[in-house]
Every structure is written in C-alpha cells, then in structure tokens.
Amino acid sequence: MPRLFAGLEIPPDITTMLSLQKGGLYGARWVDESNYHITLRFMGDVDYTLANEIVFQMSQIQCPEFDLSLRGFGSFGAKKPHSVFAAVQNNEDLLLLHHELERRMRKLGLKSDKHDYTPHVTLARLKKSAEPIDVANYLTLRGGFRTDHFRVPRFILYSSRDSTGGGPYVIEETFDLL
C-alpha cells in the first residue's frame, strides 16, 4: 500500500540556499536536501485502486504555472516546537492549486487535514531535547531569509516510506501546469 502526497519541487539553487541554513540548533534532525519539497496535500496510506483514482483526479487539474518565493523561517509546535521550516510567501495561484487538489481528494473520500494549510519547506525535525529558546534564537538569526522567485511548471505525486522523517521520497507521477 503506497503512502502518497502531492507536492512541488524546489529548484537546485534554492535547495542550496536552504541547505546552508543547517546547523546551529541542538536537537535538530536535518532533512536531506534531496527531500526538500512543498507539500500540497497528504493522502496517506491508500490501496492501489484509490491510488489510480488519485492519479486520474490529479491529471484533470488545470491550473496555470506560477512563481513562488520563500520568505523567512518558522516552527510548528506552539509550546514545544517539533519542526523548523522555510515559509512560502503568500501566493494566490498556489492556494488555487491546493484548493482544487483538496476538493478532488475529498470527492474521493479522503479526509481533510485537521490543520490549516501552511505552505512551507521542512528543514529539520526536532527531538524532544530541543529547547524552545534555542529554536527561537535560531529563527531570529535567520529572520531575513529570502529567495528570488522561482517558476513552478508542474506538481508531483510522491510516495514515501512509513518512517520517521518520511524520506526518501519517490516521484510517482508528474502533472504539468498550463
């Protein structure tokens, strides 16, 4: 049974910029650069019949290509941070793609995520030993992080292993944007 999610690739030059932000945070397990992505929608563990239906629904999405950029860092986990990420600058075209994908996956019977959609690139997962003050200091030192805009010509259906941290991720299908 595959574990599937839809996402966007990060260009190599942006990947390099992100990889240079590694280090300086005790208790961080840094994500390998080859696994950087922006998640659009997590589908979870699905059977092969549903996986084929997901591919069909994704192939029917007609959204325009668009540009994205990353702006600043953040963390998830209010009182006890559990991950550090690079934030995606607000973008209407990205939200349009996410909402269309979400609509089609709900149509297939997949439940929505309980959290609001926050587009981001996960940089590190934090062990319990990571102190909130250390995370806050790490984020403060990198508060001015910015990338140039990059083009998003397609979105991807990825599969992942059932493991801590998820990767390595495998590209199962690609879907061109218009």
Image (spheres, rainbow, N blue to C red):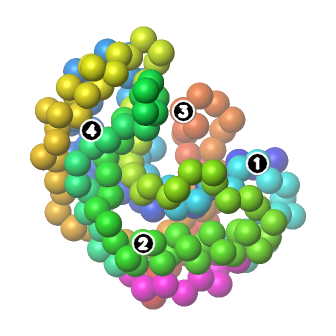
- Count of numbered labels shown in the rendering: 4
Give whichever of 156, 71 is nearer the camera. 71
Which tag is nearer the camera, tag 4 or tag 2? 2
Q: Residue under circle 1?
A: 45
Residue 165 disc label: 3
Q: Which residue is drawn at 23% across and 54% down?
A: 71
Q: Residue under circle 2?
A: 94
| Magenta region includes residue 58 | yes
Place of residue 121 in the rendered image (x, y in percent of width and height, measured from the top left):
39, 48
Residue 132, picture quadrant: top left
The reply to whether callout 1 and callout 2 are in contact (CB within 8 Å) is no
Disc 1 on helix, strand or loop?
strand
Residue 19 disc label: 4
* Image: magenta residue range: 57-65
Place of residue 152 in the rendered image (x, y in percent of width and height, measured from the top left):
37, 72
Vertical order, 165 against 171 (above or below): above
Q: Distance between the residues labelled 4 and 1?
A: 29 Å
